[in-house]
Image (cartoon, coloured by chain):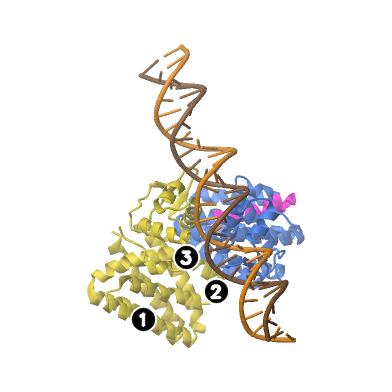
Chain colours: A blue, B yellow, C brown, D orange
Amino acid sequence: MRQYPAAWLKGQSRGEAIAGELRLRIVDGTLKQGDVISENKIAADFGTSRSPVREALKALSNEGLIRLERMGAVVQGLYAKDIAELYDVRYLIESFAQQRLASSCPAEVIATLRHRIDCMRVAAKYADIAEFAWLDFQFHDGLVAAAGHARIARLWDSIRHVVLAVMLLTTEEVFGGGPVRLERVVAKHETIADALESGDEAQIAEVVRDYFADSRRTLRSTWS
Amino acid sequence: MRQYPAAWLKGQSRGEAIAGELRLRIVDGTLKQGDVISENKIAADFGTSRSPVREALKALSNEGLIRLERMGAVVQGLYAKDIAELYDVRYLIESFAQQRLASSCPAEVIATLRHRIDCMRVAAKYADIAEFAWLDFQFHDGLVAAAGHARIARLWDSIRHVVLAVMLLTTEEVFGGGPVRLERVVAKHETIADALESGDEAQIAEVVRDYFADSRRTLRSTWS
DNA sequence: ACAGGTCGACTTGTCGACAAGTTTAAGTGC
DNA sequence: GCACTTAAACTTGTCGACAAGTCGACCTGT
């Protein structure tokens, strides 16, 4: 059984931990589309009362991973089409954020991004998959946050957990591709940082488009 | 005290009802930015236990109307800037949805839209503010749903309640502008339906841009 | 007067229990 | 064998209670 990295649960409530675990089980296919899960069953599985489970199911429902019905929640799953749609939305959000950063991107932000890129190289070297995925996520998370648009940030929040889970799984696949593949991923992030530093709207737009076009190719090989 | 239309609560749980009421109080300014509310206090106000209140606060937090902290939830409020940002997001979502409908918009969808427009005229005639706002909302809701993009639909779901509350308040203001102003609002929706029926991408893009540019003007007069 | 510690009034997170409703399953009459 | 009724096993929504933690006010020593 694949497990949710313990470091990602630090300071979270039981409900969030349960949500994280279930999310991963749905994304990696352990819980299949059509499976029905009940609060009681999950509560028994995790050894807690229904309250945290309830919170978790509500969250998963907001993320579209399950559908809450009168009797039990039915798993929706996350398959190729859903991933494609998820990346449609990521593109919408991130291109908006980066266009906004084009006009005024503080040097501090660029520095933070580059710092994370350096850390990614280290994580790649030491084969730390969870850390690499986490840094990848932090990179994009920081980007959206830096845009300074509260409502867009909420949108990002509503998909962030799913994005993180998907990243964890794709990162596993990317690590299987060896150092060359990894370096290409890191380099892709570098082009984003470069574009943002240039401040050229057109260049940023192109880089973001390329980034997601490339991501889609990677995804297609993972979820085929 | 302004009240949430009872018809909108049909079949909802206590938690959703509380969320609806609180949402309106925040959007209309009864609850101001910086106010702190506790689960106990709200539970006492509504005469329920903390469970439904907890659910409501969680929802409001997801919508960005409040911020959950260790001791009490602090109200964020929804002011001019927030409304502007909300409409940035609406534009992002709805323009995406409508572009998607450009290539293939079933006649059934157009018919439903036109039906709602007709109903809006009736609601305007009989000065039924809540019904008018509801139809306006249903129009856009139907549009997004018709696009057939599950992830975009989730995005819309995450802002729909806030959008509805804002619509209710702006509709009140619009009714104050008399029949001419109302007819202009209805006509705006008609241009959208027309554009969708034409199936011309460029025309749709322009109409949607116009629609939101006009909406922003209306909003600026309501929230000044 | 003031720094530091202590108590008390709050908060949230979690728990187990109950009521109301729905679905499945077992009868039951024929 | 089959339609119909009834009962049992689920489900969720809600409730009140408790534990753990946080913040503020109030003392106390100096």
Q: Badge 3 sits on which subunit?
A: B
Q: Badge 2 sits on which subunit?
A: B
Please tell me how crowded label 2 is: few (under 14), some (14-19), or many (20+) other residues with Cα within 10 Å. Answer: some
Q: Is residue D25 above or below residue B38?
A: above
Q: Badge 1 sits on which subunit?
A: B
Q: Residue at x 54, y 77 (%)?
A: B148
Q: Amino acid at mark 2?
A: His
Of residues B214 and B51, the one drawn nearer to the viewer in this rendering:
B51
Q: Which residue is mark 3?
A: B12
Q: Which residue is mark 1?
A: B117
Residue range highlighted in magenta: A123-141
Q: Going from the N terminus, do you reach mark 3 or mark 1 first? A: 3
Asked if marks 3 and 2 touch (Cβ < 8 Å), the reply is: no
Q: Amino acid at mark 1?
A: Ile
Mark 3 vs mark 2: give the one in front. 3
Please tell me how crowded label 1 is: few (under 14), some (14-19), or many (20+) other residues with Cα within 10 Å. Answer: many
Which image quadrant: the N terminus of chain B? Answer: bottom left
Q: Is residue D20 above or below residue A125?
A: above
Q: Residue at x 66, y 47 (%)?
A: A7
Q: Is residue B200 above or below residue B85?
A: below
Mark 3–mark 2 Cα distance, whole angstroms, equals 25 Å
Q: Which residue is mark 2?
A: B149
